[in-house]
């Protein structure tokens, strides 16, 4: 079965054609990230305008890349929650229009569950149950995943997401230029730094499965700009060596917390598989530390390929296949949801 997937929950307009939940025939992503940099965060109106401009060419490019026509697509999967409502509306409206025009079934996909599913694109035999972490710009949550449809929330951030902390710290360090996504810039500067140089806080590390990253973010802000700073406008007063040390120490604090909580969750749920998804899953230090900790605790950890950690439509079409195969389709009056209730 062949699905067209569409993703527009934040600042990426993406489309993909995937067969049987794991064979990628075509994929396309356009990002408006660089347009938001001077505002310091995603501006929903700008994201929406770019989605509107890009949605048709991106869908067309994915279909062309896959060399498939409307007749050979079996269904359309689209992210309808959670995300920026205006942005979601553009993807869902495009998907509904195509479903109606082509007379194909429509499938609604949860963006966070799609991030978890991304690992299945490479590991098609990945078995359930497992514990999954989604760490992105908007989410940091741990789930016990019992099957492709059943995700039980074990813990989540009580304030900022891990990716958001990477983005804000990159801003404090003057590293945001081309994109709002600060993770890759932090990772690259951290390579020359000492992860033990500064003892940044690891909030809530001692207990449970919830996260808190806002104290860490503030600690880095004070370290770079002084205690009297609110929001930095000037470039930080740091030398090259200090910059590397701050980035490496910050990254280490995030990675320590994510690793500790995941291992604890796997032990509490008595599972021996871990799955990581979301933009932060692209971080090499996180991968290194989790592979090492998993080996020590006799667990196996599965990461998606780098290209499917950040927002994409391959994971949407991949997960959508299982919904379509099970007959769990959506009506053309399907809604979008900004937030998904904490269960
Ligand atoms: O999953 P994603 O594309 O969008 C959301 O659903 O939010 O994740 C984007 C987030 C950004 O905060 C970005 O800085 C972070 O993922 N990210 C990284 C890396 N690559 C992307 N964080 C740490 N290290 C990376 N290599
Ligand atoms: Zn995402």
Image (spheres, rainbow, N blue to C red):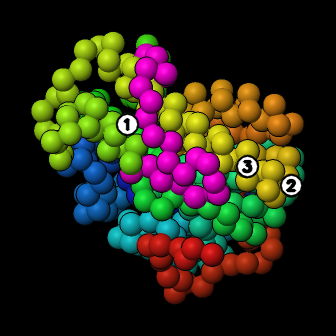
* Element marked by disc 2: loop
Looking at the image, tell me whether mark 3 or mark 2 is earlier in sequence order: 3
Q: Is residue 3 above or below residue 190?
A: below
- Dot 3 corresponds to which residue? 264
Q: Residue at x 53, y 83 (%)?
A: 334
Q: Which secondary structure lies at badge 3?
A: helix
Q: Residue furthest left?
A: 234
Residue range in magenta is 193-214
Q: Is residue 304 visible?
A: no
Distance in Å between CA atoms under marks 3 and 2: 10 Å
Residue at the spot of label 2 = 270
Q: CA distance from mark 1 to mark 3?
A: 28 Å
Measuring 43% from the left and 59% from the top, which residue is drawn there?
Answer: 159
Circle 1 SS class: loop
Q: Which residue is mark 1?
A: 182
- The residue lying toward the viewer, choosing from 229 and 334, is 229
User: Ligand 1: does it lie within 8 Å of the C-beta at label 1?
Assistant: yes
Which label sits in the foreground, 1 or 2? 2
Q: Residue at x 16, y 28 (%)?
A: 235
Asked whether, in this view, residue 216 is left or right of residue 263, the answer is left
The magenta stretch spans residue 297? no
Using the image, determine if residue 258 lies above or below residue 199. Answer: below
């Amino acid at each position: 079965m062949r699905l067209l997937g569409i993703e527009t929950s934040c600042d990426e307009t993406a489309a993909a054609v995937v067969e049987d939940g794991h064979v990628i025939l075509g994929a396309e992503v356009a990002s408006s990230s660089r347009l938001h940099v001077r505002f310091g965060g995603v501006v929903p109106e700008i994201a929406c305008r770019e989605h509107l401009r890009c949605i048709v060419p991106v869908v067309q490019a994915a279909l062309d890349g896959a060399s498939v026509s409307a007749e050979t697509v079996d269904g359309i999967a689209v992210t309808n929650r959670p995300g920026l409502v205006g942005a979601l509306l553009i993807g869902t409206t495009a998907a509904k229009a195509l479903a109606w025009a082509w007379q194909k079934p429509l499938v609604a996909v949860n963006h966070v569950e799609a991030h978890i599913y991304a690992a299945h694109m490479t590991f098609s035999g990945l078995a359930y149950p497992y514990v999954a972490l989604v760490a992105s710009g908007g989410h940091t949550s741990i789930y016990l995943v019992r099957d492709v449809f059943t995700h039980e929330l074990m813990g989540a951030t009580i304030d900022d997401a891990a990716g958001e902390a990477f983005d804000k710290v990159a801003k404090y360090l003057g590293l945001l230029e081309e994109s709002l996504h600060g993770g890759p810039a932090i990772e690259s500067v951290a390579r020359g730094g000492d992860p033990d140089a500064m003892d940044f806080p690891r909030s809530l590390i001692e207990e449970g499965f919830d996260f808190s990253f806002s104290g860490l973010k503030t600690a880095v802000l004070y370290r770079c700009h002084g205690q009297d700073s609110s929001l930095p406008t000037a470039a930080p007063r740091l030398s090259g060596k200090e910059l590397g040390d701050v980035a490496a120490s910050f990254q280490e604090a995030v990675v320590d917390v994510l690793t500790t909580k995941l291992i604890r969750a796997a032990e509490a749920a008595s599972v021996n598989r871990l799955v990581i998804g979301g933009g932060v899953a692209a971080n090499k230090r996180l991968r290194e530390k989790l592979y090492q900790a998993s080996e020590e605790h006799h667990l196996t950890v599965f990461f998606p390929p780098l290209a499917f950690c950040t927002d994409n439509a391959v994971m949407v079409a991949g997960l959508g296949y299982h919904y379509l195969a099970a007959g769990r389709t959506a009506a053309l009056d399907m809604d979008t949801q900004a937030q998904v209730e904490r269960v």
